[in-house]
Amino acid sequence: MRPPALRRPPGFATFRASMDARIAITVNGETRDIAAGATVAALLAEIGLDTRKVAVERNEEIVPRSTYTAVALTPGDRLEIVHFIGGG
Amino acid sequence: MDGHPATIDDMWEVAGRRFRSRLIVGTGRYKSLEETAAAIEASGAEIVTVAVRRVNLSDPNAPMLQDFVPPSRYTYLPNTAGCHTASDAVRTLRLAREAGGWNLVKLEVLGPPPFLYPDMRATFEAAEALIKDGFQVMVYCADDPLAAKRLEEMGCVAVMPLGAPIGSGMGVVNPYMIGAIKREAKVPVLVDAGIGTASDAALAMELGCDAVLLNSAIAHARDPVRMARAMKAAVEAGRDAFLAGRMPRNYSADPSSPMAGLIR
């Protein structure tokens, strides 16, 4: 007897659609669209930043560098990406 | 005996780190990163202050301070310049720690223009939060001996009273109180802000301060590299003069040449 067809869990279609969608986040005060599910690492790569020279804050919480590839961005996230400049 | 132990072994220590140079310089307000690097080199400084700011998203490959003033060579002392609340200062330094991994920081929480005077209530609040979070805090403060003592008791690793308002170039306007703060302190005391020229830096050191922190006096000189050199010499001269112990002041004359053996 043939096994029954694999049933997709409820909501799967919406989930798939959201993977293709883009979400709006705020980076250094500017609104920016990014692929849904993108990580902090993906965002930094898209901007073209050397991760060793910057620090990232997400919704006023530090994002440790070691977690850049694990932290996925969600709609409405507010990010600050900073570096050192000359100062007294 | 080499006769000059002061200039050879006279190191100072903050938060367990030892430094030979008693001049800390800022890295702001220069015409270019090249000029920044040249002036800092000439100053002989081992510690430099740096600011934390948003990266320019439209120009991510712009040259960065680290490429010209390498953190492998200089101890970066991240500051909270521009912060007017305790929470902004704490946020800024947490970002700095993540960017560079440094716990040694310069806390400054400023009041409004025109004086940008240290806001001591906010400074206390931020210092408490930072110390609790594991930071080693060098703190910019008013030339107030009670405030300086309380900051020390809270656990700040250095107190840094202003000589005069930031960028004013007015020098050490209250030398008696700076001297009093130094005499009472068990942590290093640095004059931070107000230094305008070499003699101001020398005076700060003659008062017994452990080091001097300045930026505009070099960056806004007509020839920053030459002024950096002057500041290096002034800090060394002031330190030596302090250790040597100045002669007493006496308004009446006391001739230097012997009176005996004068021709008649």
Image: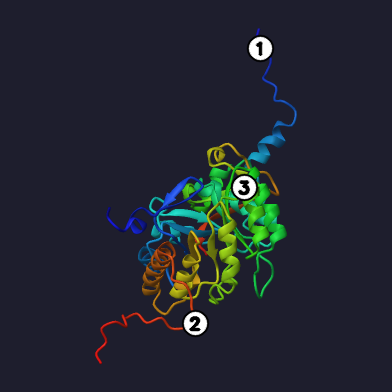
Same chain for mark 2 and mark 3? The answer is: yes
Which residue does the image show at 70% across and 49% down from the upper left?
Answer: A76
Query: Which colouring convention does the figure follow?
Result: rainbow
- Closer to the camera in the image, B246 or A12: B246
Callout 1 amino acid: Pro
- Closer to the camera in the image, B31 or A27: B31
Same chain for mark 1 and mark 3? The answer is: no
Drawn side of residue B173 relative to residue B208, left or right:
right
Mark 1 — residue? A3
What is the chain letter for disc 1?
A
- Closer to the camera in the image, B180 or B196: B180
Drawn side of residue B192 relative to residue B197, left or right:
right
Mark 2 — residue? B251
Element at badge 1? Answer: loop
Displayed quadrant of residue B87: bottom right
Mark 3 — residue? B155
Mark 2 and mark 3 lie on one chain; the one further toward the N terminus is 3
Residue B201 % position (x, y): 47, 70
